[in-house]
């Protein structure tokens, strides 16, 4: 299954800067698959080391001296140095388990034996290494990637064209896309789940595989964190389905257990966010609305996060949430369940496009689901669980700040009127 980010790997290879590239993202998003898919297409020899699972991997880098590492790798792989080094690639998986390998990568590769190195990590790497290793974040498949994977790629260009022109898609195609989008909500964008569906031509095993993935997240949290931190992280993670089924989807500590506070759980939430097990959306206040380009600069946003106790948390993949709600509700999803799924889906899509985003609400209970900055302009997003898109919230927001237009996401066909851009669920990847 082709990922859009393979184009960025091709650009990295073409530029040949001598620097490795680091793929980051949660467990299960397909980092290793993407690296191998790219490597098979462009290199004759692929060498792979996993620092989490293979003890030999760390031993090869016991010394952080690049020359020593070169000698070890040449001996281990019995490399023929007469062959062109541009025809081989080294994939280093889960490098956060071995700081010595990061020291070697910092020294500008292993020239002469591996001119191309893809590093992979499911966990944050120390700040001191980030400037030396360009990062490429990987997220679950977006809906257009899902269409391509399921041999429905011909829809993609049609959706993009109608999005840009604000022109209605023929009704029969619109209904087909809504049905495919509903299937995507159920399966989600984790590559292993999409493959499971493709192999069986059925969703029969999807819920089981989601639960297996969720269980693996619990296991990794327990394995990689002190007991007290792991307990809190799992408590937060397990509360999300209940948090998102509320009418007010802001995170409430009391749903974990009585007496809990922000101070007790802020580190657990930070860690879950860093490893991409949750998607965090902070509330933006009226003062921040006035200068959104400054507000949404990452350094300002991170600085303000510690003090911001008003936020929402979403699961990293919509399919997980669908499965957990379906286990409780069967097929009878009410307004709150549908809104939870759609909010999670849009948050996931905005994250995949690397847009910083937030939500806003006023004292009079006007609510804007998401706001993000595009082309230096603040764009509000409202999400509706049907084609009824009436709301007064945008007019309330307009009194607080200016914006060129707003987006309403619903089952309604494309349209643009009264500075409102109407976007069907299936076209969110075009934002």
Image (tube, rainbow, N blue to C red):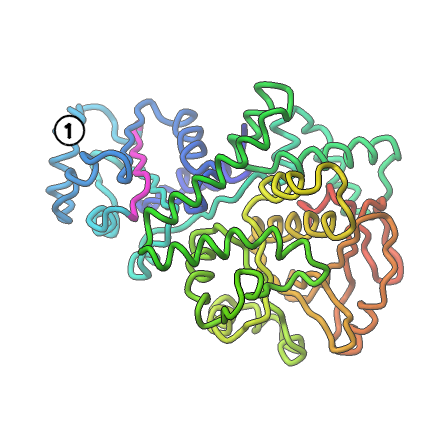
Residue found 70% across the figure and 61% down from its top: 369
On screen, 340 above or below 153?
below
Provide residue 174's location: percent of width, then percent of height: 83, 36
Quadrant location of the N terminus? Answer: top right
| Residue density around tag 1, few if under 14, some if 14–19, many if 20 or more, within 10 Å | few
Provide residue 204's location: percent of width, then percent of height: 62, 24
**Quarter assignment of residue 158:** top right
Residue bounds of the magenta highlight: 87-96
Provide residue 72's location: percent of width, then percent of height: 12, 35
Tell me: 205 left or right of 108.
right
Q: How many marks?
A: 1
Q: Secondary structure at mark 1?
A: helix
- Residue at the top extreme of this rendering: 200
**Quarter assignment of residue 199:** top right
Q: In front: 69, or 193?
A: 193
Tell me: 329 left or right of 118.
right
Residue found 60% across the figure and 18% down from its top: 200
On screen, 192 above or below 296?
above
Residue 91 located within the stretch drawn in magenta: yes
Please tell me whether the stretch drawn in magenta is mainly helix, strand or loop. Answer: strand
Q: In front: 261, or 106?
A: 261
Residue found 27% across the figure and 34% down from its top: 49
Tell me: 46 left or right of 300.
left
Q: In front: 189, or 246?
A: 246
Residue pointed to by mark 1: 76
Provide residue 343's location: percent of width, then percent of height: 68, 53
Residue found 59% across the figure and 63% down from its top: 251
- Residue at the bottom extreme of this rendering: 287
Tell me: 321 left or right of 96.
right
Residue 144 located within the stretch drawn in magenta: no
Q: In front: 5, or 338?
A: 338
């Amino acid at each position: 299954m082709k990922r859009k980010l393979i184009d960025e790997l091709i650009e990295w290879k073409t530029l040949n800067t001598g620097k490795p590239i680091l793929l980051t993202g949660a467990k299960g998003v397909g980092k290793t698959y993407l690296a191998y898919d790219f490597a098979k297409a462009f290199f004759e020899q692929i060498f792979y080391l996993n620092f989490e699972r293979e003890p030999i991997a760390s031993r090869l880098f016991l010394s952080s001296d690049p020359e020593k590492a070169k000698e070890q790798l040449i001996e281990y792989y019995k490399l023929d140095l007469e062959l062109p080094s541009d025809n081989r690639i080294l994939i280093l998986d889960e490098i956060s388990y071995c700081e010595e390998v990061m020291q070697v990568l910092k020294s500008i590769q292993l020239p002469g034996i591996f001119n191309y190195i893809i590093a992979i990590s499911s966990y944050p790497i120390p700040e001191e290494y980030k400037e030396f290793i360009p990062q490429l974040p990987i997220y679950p498949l977006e809906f257009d990637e899902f269409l391509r994977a399921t041999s429905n790629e011909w829809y993609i260009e049609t959706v993009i064209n109608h999005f840009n022109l604000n022109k209605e898609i023929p009704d029969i195609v619109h209904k087909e896309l809504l049905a495919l989008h509903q299937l995507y909500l159920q399966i989600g964008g984790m590559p292993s789940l999409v493959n499971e569906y493709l192999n069986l031509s059925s969703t029969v095993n999807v819920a089981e595989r989601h639960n297996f993935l969720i269980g693996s997240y619990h296991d990794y949290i327990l394995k990689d964190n002190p007991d007290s931190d792991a307990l809190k992280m799992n408590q937060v993670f397990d509360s999300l389905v209940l948090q998102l089924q509320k009418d007010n989807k802001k995170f409430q500590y009391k749903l974990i257990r009585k007496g809990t506070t922000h101070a007790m759980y802020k580190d657990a939430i930070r860690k879950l966010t860093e490893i991409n097990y949750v998607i965090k959306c902070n509330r933006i206040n009226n003062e921040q609305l006035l200068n959104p380009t400054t507000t949404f600069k990452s350094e300002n946003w991170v600085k303000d996060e510690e003090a911001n106790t008003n936020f929402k948390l979403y699961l990293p993949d919509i399919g997980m949430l669908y499965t957990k709600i379906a286990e409780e509700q069967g097929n009878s999803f009410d307004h709150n369940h549908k809104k939870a799924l759609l909010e999670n889906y849009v948050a996931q899509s905005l994250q995949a496009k690397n847009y910083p985003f937030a939500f806003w609400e006023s004292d009079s209970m006007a609510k804007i689901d998401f706001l993000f900055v595009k082309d230096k302009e603040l764009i509000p997003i409202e999400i509706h669980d049907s084609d009824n898109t009436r709301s007064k919230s945008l007019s309330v927001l307009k009194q607080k700040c200016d914006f060129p237009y707003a987006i309403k996401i619903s089952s309604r066909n494309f349209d643009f009127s009264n500075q409102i851009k109407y976007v069907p669920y299936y076209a969110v990847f075009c934002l």
